[in-house]
Image (cartoon, coloured by chain):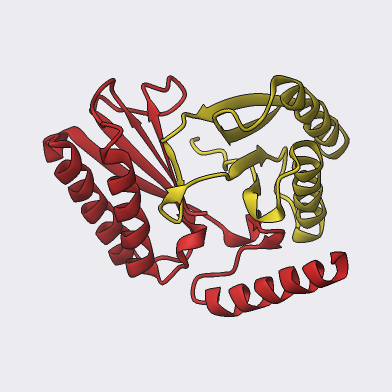
Chain colours: A yellow, B red
Amino acid sequence: MTPCLCLVQEGQIPDEVQASIRNALSALSERAFGHPAEFSWREVRSGSGFTAAKPSTASIVSLVAHKALSQSERVPLLEEVCDIWMRETNCSIDEVVASINDPAPVTGD
Amino acid sequence: MPLYTTNYVKGAISEEAKPKIAADITRIHCDVTGAPATFVHAFFFEESSELPLDGQSAFLFGRIRGGRTDAQKAQIVNEMQESIHTHTGLPLDDIKVATADTPAKWVMEGGDLLPEPGEEAAWLAAHEAKLAAAAKVSA
């Protein structure tokens, strides 16, 4: 499974849109990483989210890749995540922050 | 990015305190790093089971772009801890603040990869020009 954290502002994304986003991101994950996405979907309560110290309308979408990615692999996926988010939510490009992290290095013996 | 999430026990941070702490988080981050305020996100969660509290009443975790010095990170931690203390009355030793680095090139904001630390002004100028050009095309 591909960990996928979505932080959204309360009331910003209706349930049916959330379902559509999950489907689209999971399809991306399956195609790119070979696994569906496992979502952690968190709503930031009204009055609890700030961007530039003002009430936020930003969404944060963060996936963890199955392996370390080259930038030529990562950038098109980031663009696709942003496109999905804008298409499904009608937000502007300045309202979505996307990250695709490499997996944490394995430590220990 | 940066993304600052604060998890707190029920009632530890009032609704009135949140915008004040968020303003401090934004000011401190920008003063210390030179980053633009528009990059700074500060989100608060009450007793989220998915975020750490580490036995504290409030735990502020900042995911920041890599490349900051240890001195910058220490200043961020100390000043943000002080801010939460000031606006909540919680004892300093009941407030934890920590940061972790994320490479800028892993993050896209406004449709562009984030700039490396110190390259924000050029990034903002290019980003605003891009948005203006897009607006002109769609007009």
User: x, y percentage for residue A81?
Assistant: 76, 44
Location of residue B139 with respect to A39 vertically, above or below: below
Residue at 71% over, 40% down: A65
The answer, for residue A1, to whether it is visible in the render is: no
A53 to the left or right of A103: left
- Identify which residue is drawn at 46% across, 29% down: A45
Residue A102 placed where, x, y %? 65, 46
Tell which of B133 and B116 is nearer to you.
B133
Q: Is residue B109 left or right of residue B37?
A: right
B55 vs A15, left or right, is left
- The location of residue A83, given as percent across then percent down, is 80, 47
Q: Is residue A76 visible?
A: yes
Q: Is residue B114 above or below residue A88?
A: below
The foreground one among B35 and A108 is: B35
> Where is residue B102 shown, x and y percent of the image?
53, 53
Q: Is residue A74 above or below residue A85?
A: below
Q: Quadrant of the N terminus of chain A?
A: top right
Does residue B3 lie above or below B5 as drawn? below
B119, B36: nearer the viewer: B36
Q: Residue at x 59, y 69 (%)?
A: B115
Residue appearing at x 12%, y 36% in the figure = B89
